[in-house]
Amino acid sequence: MSEECNHDCSSCGTTCGDDTRRTIPYEEPNELSNIRHTIAVVSGKGGVGKSLVTGLLAVAMSRKGCHVGIMDADITGPSVPKMFGVSGEILGNQAGAYPVSSAGGIDIVSMNLFLEDTSDPVVWRGPVISGVVKQFWQDVIWNDVDYLFIDMPPGTGDVPLTVMQSIKLDGIVIVTSPQELVSMIVEKAVKMASVMKVPILGIVENMSYFECPDCGKQHKIYGESHLEEIAKEYNLDILGRIPIQPNLAAKCDAGQIETVDSEYLQAAVDKLLAGDKK
């Protein structure tokens, strides 16, 4: 570690020792917030369906009677509002800002809810983006939320580092896909969680297979799954497998993810509820 270290890991690419990182205090949420559990959904690379998993987890937990929130931390590529059919302006006062609620009562904060035109790009540098994520945590009033899911951008850059460093997480869910190179990507996410001392709840595989609607046969579009061996290698629980399903994609595009009837993530739901009873 450099002698000039200021303990601000968000602006540093150096890997310090575990003890140094955890001497940095977690940021407190808004004083009016009440959040019981905070779960981040991560992936080592883009395009694996991390936002889809976040949305399905939120819907599944909401159906179990939990009050759920989603913090869309993918500032430059937000997709959560579209999946939930949510629009409108984020309102607030001197105490803080308030999430926009979906039709099913899921509280959502996303950069797209601050833009006049949702197609406008967010052209900001990393430190500014990280600052916005902190504002979503500190300035937003998350009222009586049982589970707050944080939809993270891919990789191990500024925002994932800021979230893991600043927010006390109950755990992360790693999203992957069947491609063989994914083992290396999962290892990066696992090692980052280890360095930051964040528990890993398990792994979800998206795009696992395509089931033919005519014959019912499963086709491995992206090759044979390596989920079992990856889970065994890194001692991870398998929390679900999501197939390629055109109807699911269509409902997400139409803002109707809350109408999806899916049991693909039942193992993840069971684990979250079991942890809540401890």
Image: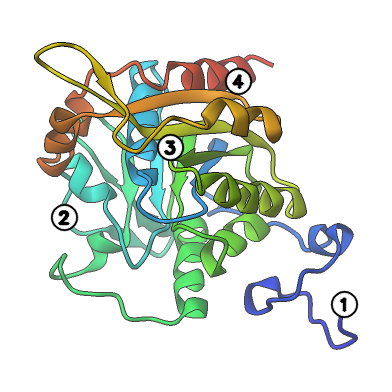
Between marks 3 and 1, how big is the CA–CA gap? Answer: 37 Å
- Measuring 55% from the left and 67% from the top, which residue is drawn there? 157
Image coords of residue 60 (percent x, y)? 36, 22
Between marks 4 and 1, how big is the CA–CA gap? Answer: 38 Å
Q: Badge 3: few (under 14), some or many (20 or more) residues near its Cα, within 10 Å? A: many
Image coords of residue 153 (percent x, y)? 44, 58
Give the number of the mark in front: 3 or 4: 3
137 relative to 264, above or below: below
Q: Badge 4: few (under 14), some or many (20 or more) residues near its Cα, within 10 Å? A: few
Give the number of the mark in front: 3 or 2: 3
Furthest-front residue in this view: 223
- Measuring 73% from the left and 54% from the top, which residue is drawn there? 196
SS assignment at label 1: loop
Give the amino acid at mark 1.
Met
SS assignment at label 2: loop
Give the amino acid at mark 4.
Asp
Q: Answer left or right for 129 relative to 82.
A: right
